[in-house]
């Protein structure tokens, strides 16, 4: 475990390799799982506001779910999450002509239609944050659908924290990330040298 500020970072975030391989997984993290993506109350408000901008990109089934229960719900664990279709697909999932899943919010952002990129939990994946009163746990979430991402990460020599540089800065700030990078480099060097 590494500590940067009030964040406790799992060693998996520093040691494991990862680069999203969309050619292999086709964006399966948007359509697999038993709950939607975790969101904050602030993000919930943002999603409701930007809904008209992404509405036509959503599937008819997703539009129906949103009309019936809104863009989010509280799951069995008491977390606020995006609404889902057929107990798995995020309502904000849309599809490219190649069958690739993509986030309708991210698509709208890239096209300049909205100023919000996507929920931070989606941007940070495969890292999951758990906030406690005195610290934030930063953990790597391993999922079989991301096996190709681990393989590609190993091939390219990219660690989880390096792949997630942009969302980690978005979440914790550049100074925090710089400290994480320096700490990780020292840790990995010491581990390689056997001096830990």
Image: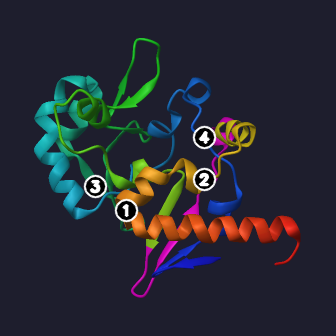
Which residue is tagged 2?
160
Q: How is the image coloured?
A: rainbow
Which residue is tagged 4?
19
Number of numbered discs present? 4
Q: Position of residue 151 (x, y in %)?
A: 73, 38
For marks 3 and 4 on the same chain, the one whose residue lies earlier in the sequence = 4
Observer-nearest of 115 and 187: 187
For marks 3 and 2 on the same chain, the one whose residue lies earlier in the sequence = 3
Q: Residues in magenta?
A: 131-148
For marks 1 and 4 on the same chain, the one whose residue lies earlier in the sequence = 4
**Within the image, what quadrant is residue 51 found in?**
top left
Residue 147 located within the stretch drawn in magenta = yes
For marks 4 and 2 on the same chain, the one whose residue lies earlier in the sequence = 4
Observer-nearest of 37 and 106: 106
* Residue drawn where x is 35% and y is 57% of the image: 170
Observer-nearest of 108 and 51: 108
Which residue is tagged 1?
171
Observer-nearest of 111 and 173: 173
- Check if mark 3's residue and mark 2's residue have beta carbons within 8 Å: no
* Residue drawn where x is 74% and y is 65% of the image: 188
For marks 1 and 3 on the same chain, the one whose residue lies earlier in the sequence = 3
Which residue is tagged 3?
73
* Residue drawn where x is 26% and y is 27% of the image: 58
| Mark 3 residue crowding within 10 angstroms, few (<14) / some (14–19) / many (20+) | some
Q: Report, in whole angstroms, how far the alpha carbon at label 1 lies from the one at label 4.
A: 19 Å
Give the left or right position of residue 15, taking residue 48 as reference: right
């Amino acid at each position: 475990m590494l500590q940067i500020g009030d964040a406790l970072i799992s060693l998996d975030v520093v040691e494991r390799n990862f680069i999203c391989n969309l050619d292999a997984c086709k964006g399966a993290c948007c359509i697999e799982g038993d709950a939607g993506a975790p969101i904050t109350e602030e993000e919930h408000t943002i999603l409701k506001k930007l809904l008209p901008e992404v509405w036509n990109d959503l599937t008819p089934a997703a539009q129906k779910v949103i009309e019936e229960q809104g863009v989010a719900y509280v799951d069995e664990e008491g977390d606020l999450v995006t609404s889902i279709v057929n107990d798995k697909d995020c309502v904000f999932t849309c599809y490219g002509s190649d069958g690739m899943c993509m986030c309708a919010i991210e698509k709208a952002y890239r096209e300049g239609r909205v100023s919000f990129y996507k929920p931070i939990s989606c941007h940070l994946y495969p890292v999951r944050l758990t906030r406690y009163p005195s610290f934030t746990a930063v953990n790597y979430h391993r999922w079989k659908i991301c096996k190709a991402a681990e393989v590609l990460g190993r091939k390219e020599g990219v660690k989880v924290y390096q792949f997630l540089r942009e969302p980690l800065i978005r979440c914790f700030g550049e100074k925090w990330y710089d400290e994480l990078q320096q700490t990780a480099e020292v840790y990995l060097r010491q581990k390689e040298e056997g001096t830990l």
